Image: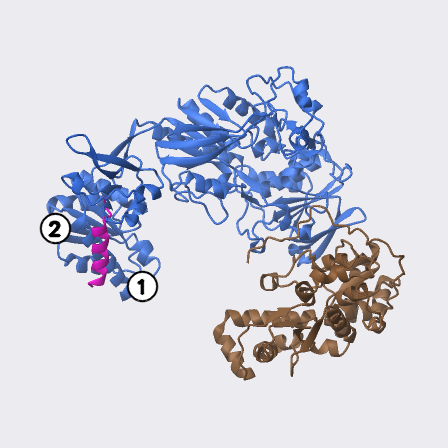
Chain colours: A brown, B blue
Amino acid sequence: MIKVGFYPGCSMKGGAQEYQESVTALAKVFDIELVEVPDWNCCGATAAHNMNKELSLSLPARIMALAEKEGITDIVVPCAACYNRLSLVKHELAEDPSLSSKVASIIDLKYQGTTQILNIIQFIDKYITDKLEEKVVKPFDYKSACYYGCLLVRPHSILKFDRVEDPQSMDVLVRKAGGNAIDWAFKTECCGAGLSVSRTDTVARLSGNILKDAVDREAEVVVVACPMCHSNLDMRRPEINKFLEKKIDVPVMYISQVLGLAVGIDAKTLGLNRHMTEVNLPVRPAKEPAVAAVPEKVVITQKTEA
Amino acid sequence: MSRIGVFVCHCGENISATVNCEKVAKITGELKGVEFSTDYKYMCSYPGQTLIKEAIKEHKLDGVVVAACSPRMHEPTFRKACAEAGLNPFLCEMSNIREHCSWVHPKDDLTTEKAQDLVRVMVEKVKKNKALNSIKVPVTKTALVIGGGIAGIQAALDIANCGHKVIMVERQPSIGGHMSQLSETFPTLDCSQCILTPRMVEVAQHPNITLHTYSEVESVDGFIGNFKVKIRKRSKSIDEHLCTGCGLCTTKCPQKKIPNEFERGLGFRPAIYVPFPQAVPNKPVIDREHCTYYIKGKCKICEIVCPTKAIRFDQEDEVIDVAVGAIVMATGFDVLKTDYFPEYGYGKYADVIDGLAFERLASASGPTQGEIRRPSDGKIPKKIVFVACAGSRDPAKGIEYCSKICCMYTAKHAMLYKHKVHDGIPYVFYMDIRAGGKNYEEFVRRTIVEDETQYIRGRVSTIYEKNGKLIVKGADTLMGAQPVEIEADMVVLATAGVANHGAEELAQTVHISYDPYKFFAEAHPKLKPVETNTAGIFLAGACQAPKDIPESVAAASGAAVKVAALFSNDELTRDPLVAVVNRSAPPVYSQCVGCFLCQSVCPYQAIEREEIKNRNGEVIKTLARVNEGLCQGCGTCVALCRTKAIDIHGYSNQQVYTEIMALLND
């Protein structure tokens, strides 16, 4: 059993319980135990860095400092917003040692910035991908639109994760799980994010356009890696349907749920029953995994100057 | 006791703004051995030089230190002035108080003190300087032109018409370069092929020009006037003397589906091919990577059909040695590769093409005979979006510079499209329209006004395909950054002009410097635009920076004049700052022990073996000797010599130590 650090953030304990359940269940299949950072706090999300710079640095720094104290080297951060905040703070403190020591005095903990922050895909790639294909028992044979959103890939100059304008990492994972990751246009468009409550109409428009393109291209499922994206695409369905003037029933699943199904975890353990939009995938007769439609001539590596 | 003169230059305000030049002159004037010191506003000007000359005569100076700019800038100027006043030019040295001091420090007493230190160091060095005589070397009056595009062609013809021999090396099977791919040229819309192909033929037929196509420069040794170059002539797999260029082989070759590079992948070619019908030389080559015979070991259909039996499957590469006196670099440019634009779907969608591909579509000799038809289904596009600055002026893509030619060729593309598809609508997304040039602005106006092209000032954020249309999303910044969405049939990206592939390796092969973008560096951006920092090597065309045709041709003619001027001398004089192996009498007691480590490290093969014989003619010792004609004075041998037997004239170990001691003994 490998132990890897885990930062749930607020969403895993609330609206996105099924995300944590599926990540934990998936990790277990691959003999990995996720250890929560003890006494963790809020990452600050959008509120802190709009209000108070020091607070926005200190909150994530405290989480990382606590992990360091526990001897945790890798922290898995499934929420894309938390991942973004932790990574950006780590970068900013590494760039400015005097700021780093100031933050250390605020949180009253030793902070070195040595922990590795992993988003869900990086975690899977580091610990699971190599063994994934041999564990697949039920190929996820569905046309999948992988939706990355904004926080996973931007700002590219700091996160340096995947191709910022046309990411591929989730598509690769879905293909390994036997799925057919389709090429579509809205991979990194904004879902409306935190406007979900204050400007629901905007979210309905933005998320609606995303779902419309996926459905137009005959996607059977939208795959996400962010609880915020999930909540907008899944929970705001009544408003979206009103905006689009038609009913869209494509389910939205976390990448951990997709891989979980493929390696044979049951739907309930993965929390699929918790979604607002029912996950009702058609039963496919067992066959060879569908041949992935890899677009020709697309080069995965992006050459960017740091 | 020395009698040294110190001359401190203000360089207008370049130095005097931060350094107290009067004080530098006064303090250094008190140094031991300094006979005279003064300061002046422009020491390099005629009155400034006269000042130096008169001081040399009046004060009987035996050494001169000019404290001014970098010696790269004006050392020849001041040494010449000293020589005119009767002082050996190598007794004159420059102390760089501009680049090394005034430009990099604020106005401060410490800055002035640093200038004094720099001058004092040089005074101590000059005390140890020796009078030296220039070295004379012969000039080989043959030029090498690398690259056979319009710049190389122009340079070669100009040099050849001056009566000098020219060797042209071109990597591709034909000369012509990018210009041969173009349809019409801005701002006059004359056909590119019509003005280029006669020049190509002229190159092939010129008695003074030897053409090596399908060839590359492998190594360059030597120096100005005396370069030794190895050229690898890649095997064309045909006997050029027997081949008549009838083209039968190209029609019978069973490999027909190889993407045609000349057509930017919009058409196909066989494995034995000429790149385009007007190619020079108009004789095919076999692309061994795709030829059935080289892949599977059988086929040889071309050999069977060839009426003159010219096919040579076993032909090998040939490496030839040539001696030249000057080299013109004319290797051109390339356009940015596909993987820079995932957001534009370039490489993913067949109808998102680059500017060069559009040139082929618009060209009468192109894959569509000049009709604008989109690559995916051959339909005539009714809406085209042109995206300017695709990669250029975009630090996020790693290219900060303006590619310069795109504004004009995009306007031309929109115009050509409108001329051919009257009911079509061309859109151009642009950042700024940079149309500086004779008749350029008028040309762009014509595109906008007469040809009704929709110019939208803003950038394109993303392009995706939906229901057979390309959805182009962007912003119109003149309308308050209002989002714009266009359903286009085809998109043309004006991708950034970048250094040609292999430019970096070639620059290292010929020993010239290049910038961070791998474009070759000129010796001075304003006053030496076609020279490199390596004497005898010149630049022509877009290998230096993105350039349009008129500019490339002008630069090529400029480079040709430099070559012709060089060849107007029968011999060149060189600075005698070369390595020398110290000899004693008798030579057997020389410090050199004959280990020849120096020979193994010399990059210029300038170390020779000299045998010392006794009266009976028996070899009693072998010593190193430096060939002054080959030595470039790099000093590698000096650093390596175990017995300190080698020194460099003008930079002896003793002189360098003296400089260091002068600094330490402040």
Residue B500 place in picture, x, y as percent: 54, 41
Are the residues flagged by discs 1 and 2 from a single subunit? Answer: yes
Q: Is residue B629 above or below residue A183?
A: above
- Between the residue at mark 1 and the residue at mark 2, the CA separation in whole angstroms equals 33 Å
Q: Which residue is mark 2?
A: B2
Residue B600 place in picture, x, y as percent: 34, 42
Q: Nearer the viewer, mark 1 or mark 2?
A: 2
Kindly give the residue lying farthest to the left in the view shown: B1
Q: Which residue is mark 1?
A: B107
Q: Which residues are magenta?
A: B649-666
Pointer 1 indicates a residue of which chain?
Answer: B
Give whichever of A97, B385 is nearer the camera. A97
Mark closer to the chain start, 1 or 2: 2
Do callouts 1 and 2 mark residues in contact (Cβ within 8 Å)? Answer: no
Crowd tier of the residue under label 2, counting other residues whose Cα lies within 10 Å: few below 14, some 14–19, many 20 or above: some
Q: Is residue A136 above or below residue A296?
A: below
Q: Residue at x 56, y 23 (%)?
A: B281
Residue type at mark 2: give it.
Answer: Ser
Crowd tier of the residue under label 1, counting other residues whose Cα lies within 10 Å: few below 14, some 14–19, many 20 or above: some
Q: Residue at x 71, y 47 (%)?
A: B348
Q: Secondary structure at mark 2?
A: loop
Q: Is residue B125 visible?
A: yes
| Residue B622 marker | none
Q: Secondary structure at mark 1?
A: loop
Pointer 2 indicates a residue of which chain?
Answer: B
Residue A179 place in picture, x, y as percent: 79, 57
Q: Residue at x 23, y 36 (%)?
A: B134
Give whichever of B392, B149 is nearer the camera. B149
Q: Is residue B351 above or below residue B262?
A: below
Give whichever of B88, A97 is nearer the camera. A97
Q: Does B661 appear in magenta? A: yes
The C terminus of chain B: image quadrant: bottom left
